[in-house]
């Protein structure tokens, strides 16, 4: 097995940023994220978020493309949510996502950031580079430095 340390911060949103991830659905979606990641041999360090989006800090093995990883996890979690809701397509994720690669040294601080998402959003202390999900919100227009 090769040696690898490939860490990422991912974020994606519910369709139209609808507040689906309430106190009942959120834990189910998070468990689904962990379960699919385990099947993919992805190490999930932390999952967090608020009602309309989710953050995942994960280490992705080099044999798995980032887009495939995110697609698999999003697909499995939306399927689980819809199954629990008893409908076929009420809950969904937007097609885009944000991904930031992380150095080993920043991993603990990003894990803490994701763990405390609800507090960050309540206080207005979000870190913008970790909140971008695609070109529509301005990501990709400029390069951003990742806080250490």
Image (cartoon, grey):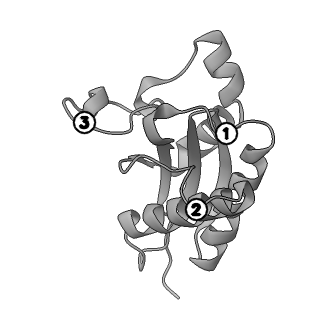
Which mark identifies residue 88? 2
Q: Residue at x 48, y 52 (%)?
A: 8
* Mark 1 or 3: the one toward you: 1
Can the viewer see residue 90 in this picture?
yes
Q: Which residue is mark 3?
A: 135
Q: Residue at x 80, y 43 (%)?
A: 24
- Say which quarter of the image contains residue 67: bottom left
Which mark identifies residue 47? none
| Residue 137 in the image, given as x and y percentages of width and height | 31, 28
Q: Residues within 10 Å of mark 2 (few under 14, many from 20)?
A: few
Q: CA distance from mark 3 to mark 2?
A: 29 Å
The earlier-in-sequence mark between 3 and 2 is: 2
* Mark 3 or 2: the one toward you: 2
Q: List the single residue furthest toward the bottom.
A: 1
Q: Residues within 10 Å of mark 1 (few under 14, many from 20)?
A: many
Q: Which residue is mark 1?
A: 21
Q: Relative to 100, is 139 on the left or the right?
A: left
The earlier-in-sequence mark between 1 and 2 is: 1
| Residue 39 in the image, given as x and y percentages of width and height | 63, 78
Q: Residue at x 74, y 59 (%)?
A: 84
Q: Is residue 113 above or below residue 30?
A: above
């Amino acid at each position: 097995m090769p040696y690898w340390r490939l860490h990422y911060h991912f974020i994606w949103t519910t369709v139209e940023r609808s507040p689906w991830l309430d106190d009942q659905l959120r834990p189910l979606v998070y468990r689904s994220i962990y379960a699919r990641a385990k099947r993919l041999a992805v190490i999930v360090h932390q999952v967090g978020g608020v009602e309309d989006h989710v953050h995942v800090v994960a280490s992705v093995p080099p044999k798995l493309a980032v887009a495939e990883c995110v697609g698999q996890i999003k697909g499995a979690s939306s399927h689980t949510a819809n199954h629990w809701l008893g409908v076929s397509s009420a809950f969904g994720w937007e097609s885009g996502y944000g991904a930031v690669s992380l150095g080993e040294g920043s991993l603990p601080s990003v894990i803490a950031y994701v763990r405390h998402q609800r507090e960050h959003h309540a206080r207005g202390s979000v870190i913008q580079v970790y909140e971008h999900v695609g070109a529509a919100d301005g990501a990709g227009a400029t390069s951003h430095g990742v806080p250490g």
